[in-house]
Amino acid sequence: MKTNQLILKPKVLFFDINETILNTAPLRSFLSYKFGKNAYDLWFSKLLHYSLVSTVTDTYKNFGLIAIDALKVVSNLKRTDFTADTSTQLVNILSSLPAFPDVLKALEILKEKGYLIVALSNSSKDLLKRQLTNAKIDYLFDKQISTEIFQSYKPHRDVYLKAAYLLNTPIEECMLVASHNWDVYGALCAGLRAAFIKRSEQQAYFLSLKPDIEGIGLLSLFQEL
């Protein structure tokens, strides 16, 4: 655990969802079975790449459509057949990912401490709602924000600024909690506080900026807040 002294406690905690709150292991297994070794990592890198291109070129495209397009690319690279059923399976698995074991307890404690708990995800509004409902943790979030309403994707700095504005909260009183270094870095560049939660093989890489908190799992977070 590495922590910078929190002189000013945040009031709003924005949580990334996929790979931070929800465990993508079922999707990883499906893609590995369907397309071969490392298919998930290849797919996710393409998904991130295409969503960034969509954002910087100001040509917003639905997250689900980008996810399917990215999977088609993986299918071509792996020289496997891609069918409509594959798209359906992808969406169904994405919608039904389980929460990590530490999520329930950590969020309950943070809510008891008085923090506003907000989901901030690149998933579409409908997908985000299904994900949190199916994982049976939707009631733990005071608000669900899909970047869809901003027509941009994280880690564009405007996403974090607009999310803070939406909640009428100064950016310095907001903190992003995520397991992706690029997400954390985007929040830091926008002036928010940030906590990097290490999951699996995620690496801490933030160039010249450092998150306020670095920990393994969400239970390490509430100990610092």
Image (tube, rainbow, N blue to C red):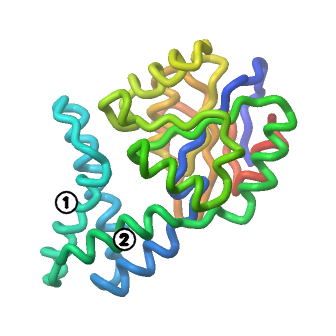
Q: Write the residue at 17% across / 67% down.
A: 73
**Residue 58 at x, y percent in the picture:** 19, 29
Residue 69 is at least partly visible in this image: yes
Query: Which comes sooner in the sequence, label 2 or label 1?
Result: 2
Residue 61 lies left or right of residue 125; in this view the side is left
Other residues around mark 1 within 10 Å, as few (<14) / some (14–19) / many (≥20): some
* Inter-mark Cα distance, 2 to 1: 14 Å
Q: Write the residue at 67% across / 53% down.
A: 137
Other residues around mark 2 within 10 Å, as few (<14) / some (14–19) / many (≥20): many
Q: Amino acid at mark 1?
A: Asp
Vertical comparison of 85 with 5: above or below: below
Q: Are marks 2 and 1 in contact (CB under 8 Å)?
A: no
**Residue 112 at x, y percent in the picture:** 86, 37
Q: Which mark is residue 189?
A: none
**Residue 118 at x, y percent in the picture:** 62, 35
Q: Amino acid at mark 2?
A: Tyr
Disc 1 designates what residue? 69
**Residue 18 at x, y percent in the picture:** 50, 55
Q: Quadrant of the C terminus?
A: top right
Q: Which mark is residue 40?
A: 2
Residue 14 is at least partly visible in this image: no
Between 91 and 110, the one lying in front of the other is 91
Q: Closer to the observer: label 2 or label 1?
A: 1
Q: Write the residue at 31% across / 70% down.
A: 88
